[in-house]
């Protein structure tokens, strides 16, 4: 199989006569290279998102979502192909596979940090919204009493929505 990898688009061009099976050392090394490049690109996007969220630039971090989603799709597609050819890769390019494993460990560590930062940002946002909601509720409480000397029971007609999909 003759294939070339375009690092700009993440696409592999070539003939698929053997239905994606890796049979040569060059193909195995190319497969590992493609996955490593995609993983590094995704890692870069995740690190950028983490930095933006830490800096409080949530809108800019949200703007990264389409790029991050596309890179994640490429990563999963390549990871599945690598898994499907794991025996051939291990036999044909053991050094490249070892490098991929090391890169994957780093990737997981950065992903854990990113998830912790996003969870913290979400928690802070929820606390702010709850605080505002409580303030609005207190501000709307009546300052009068009924004939019996107790405050009237009222319900607020305003609502506050919380988007939990941050």
Image (cartoon, rainbow, N blue to C red):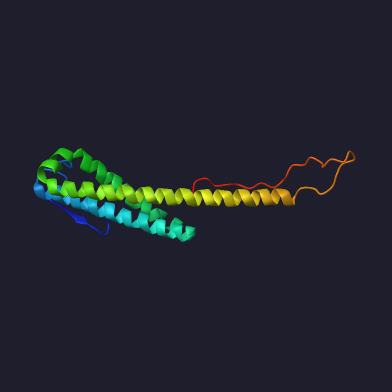
| Residue pictured at 41% horizontal, 54% vertical | 65
Q: How far across and how far down the image is residue 130, in percent?
A: 61, 48
| Camera sees residue 15 | no
| Camera sees residue 71 | yes
Outermost residue on the right side: it is 147
Q: 66 left or right of 93?
A: right
Q: 87 left or right of 155?
A: left
Q: How far across and how far down the image is residue 48, in percent?
A: 38, 59
Q: Judge whether 148 appears above or below 50 on screen.
A: above
The one nearer the camera, 67 or 13, is 67
| Residue pictured at 54% horizontal, 47% vertical | 163
Q: How far across and how far down the image is residue 79, in percent?
A: 25, 44
Q: 119 left or right of 73?
A: right
The one nearer the camera, 38 or 48, is 48
Q: How far across and how far down the image is residue 12, in percent?
A: 21, 52
| Residue pictured at 18% horizontal, 40% vertical | 85
User: How many numbered marks are there?
Assistant: 0
The one nearer the camera, 99 or 33, is 99
| Residue pictured at 38% horizontal, 50% vertical | 113
């Amino acid at each position: 199989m003759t294939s070339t990898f375009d690092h700009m688009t993440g696409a592999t061009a070539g003939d698929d006569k053997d239905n994606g099976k890796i049979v040569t050392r060059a193909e195995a090394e190319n497969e590992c290279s493609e996955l490593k490049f995609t993983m590094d690109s995704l890692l870069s996007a995740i690190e950028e998102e983490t930095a933006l969220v830490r800096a409080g630039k949530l809108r800019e971090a949200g703007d990264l979502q389409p790029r991050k989603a596309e890179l994640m799709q490429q990563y999963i597609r390549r990871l599945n192909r690598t898994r499907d050819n794991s025996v051939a890769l291990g036999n044909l390019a053991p050094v490249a596979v070892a490098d991929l494993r090391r890169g994957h460990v780093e990737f997981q560590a950065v992903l854990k940090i990113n998830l912790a930062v996003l969870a913290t940002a979400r928690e802070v946002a929820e606390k702010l919204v709850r605080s505002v909601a409580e303030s609005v509720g207190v501000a709307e409480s009546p300052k009068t009493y009924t004939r019996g000397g107790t405050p009237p029971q009222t319900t607020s007609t305003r609502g506050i929505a919380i988007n939990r999909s941050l």
